[in-house]
Amino acid sequence: MNMTQPHSFVTLGEAMAMFVAKTPGQLADIEDFHRSLAGAEVNVAIGMARLGFEASYISKVGKDSFGGFIRKAISKENICNDWISESASHATGFMLKSNVTDGSDPKVEYFRRNSAASTLSAADIDASLFKTGAHLHLTGIAAAVSVPMRDAAKHALELAKKQGCSVSFDTNLRPSLWSDQATMVATINEFAFASDIVLPGIEEGKILTGSNQPEIIADFYLQQGVKAVIVKLGSDGAYFKTSSDESGTAAGFPVTKVVDTVGAGDSFAVGIISALLDGKTIAQAARRGNLLGSLTVQVRGDSEALPTRAHLNSLEKNQLEKE
């Protein structure tokens, strides 16, 4: 499955200020935190921008210091923030993340209910973003944050498809943001069916399709018209299958020490999307996704390990030489 490099990359979602504990322990006991930028979609935008793609991010922040921080952080990554609007009546969301040393998932607490981003709506989506050749990336988080943001994501999807843009969808399940599992499954699958590329995790696939077999999960979406499905298998790598019946498993990259698992799936998405837009094969895309995911779990932070184009070229060249 090959795709032509687009003029632009577009995504939407909720960016938050993230405070990461500097030392291990219960969040209630931590006094010192490091502030950084967080949000699944903005992580992907950062990764794409670092690889030289023209990236635009659609969101909404409050007229507060967190909102100012997010705008500056996004601009620093060379992401267009012209489509980040402000809410005068809602605050910017933020989150706390614990510091773990045993490779387990850190504890995360969100403060995002009724946030500025939750008021993002279809009216905030500008059709001019979806020029022919652009790529749209959506996630299940944007679909879960609020009904208005879900409508915004649907509108963006409709505009993108109308212009013939390619669309990727990371299922990114967040059950705590949904009223019930049935609604979550139905809504997430609706977005997935309308996308070209679907990126479920193996456990997410079981919830969404009823099977924990990678090929059955892939077939579930391919039968609905999806062009490619890449199932994340954690340390075991990724399984891929396309509508042209190309399939296989891309091995994961061994990691000596897992530092922080948060953001690995977003880095995986950067690898998949960038490789396909670079004209790589689906197998090469899965391999790059695994590579970027492995980089992220080795550092503390969601996007800190995402490489520049020069760094990625060096990493992939070294890998080819090893193989």
Image: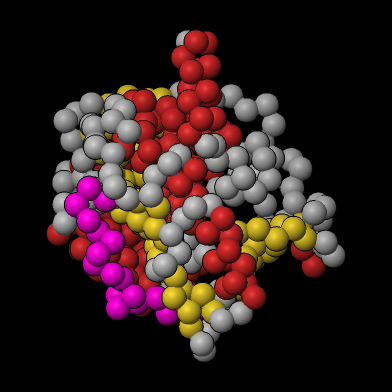
In the rendered image of this protein, does residue 236 appear above or below residue 73? above
Residue ranking furthest to the bottom: 89
111 above or below 250? below
Question: Would you say 17 lies left or right of 266 here?
Answer: right
Tell me residue 242's x, y (percent).
23, 33
Q: Residue at x 77, y 60 (%)?
A: 33
| Horizontal side, residue 8 vs residue 173: left or right | left
Could you say where residue 13 lies in the image, as x and y percent from the top left?
A: 43, 64
- For residue 266, above or below residue 272: below
**Quick check: is 136 in the magenta stretch?**
no
The answer to whether residue 177 shows anywhere in this view is: yes
* Residue at point 42%, 79% (across, down): 119
Place residue 1 in its image quadrant: top left
The residues colored magenta run 113-134
Spot occupied by residue 43 in the image (x, y as percentages of width and height): 51, 52
Residue at (25%, 64%) from the top-left corner?
A: 128
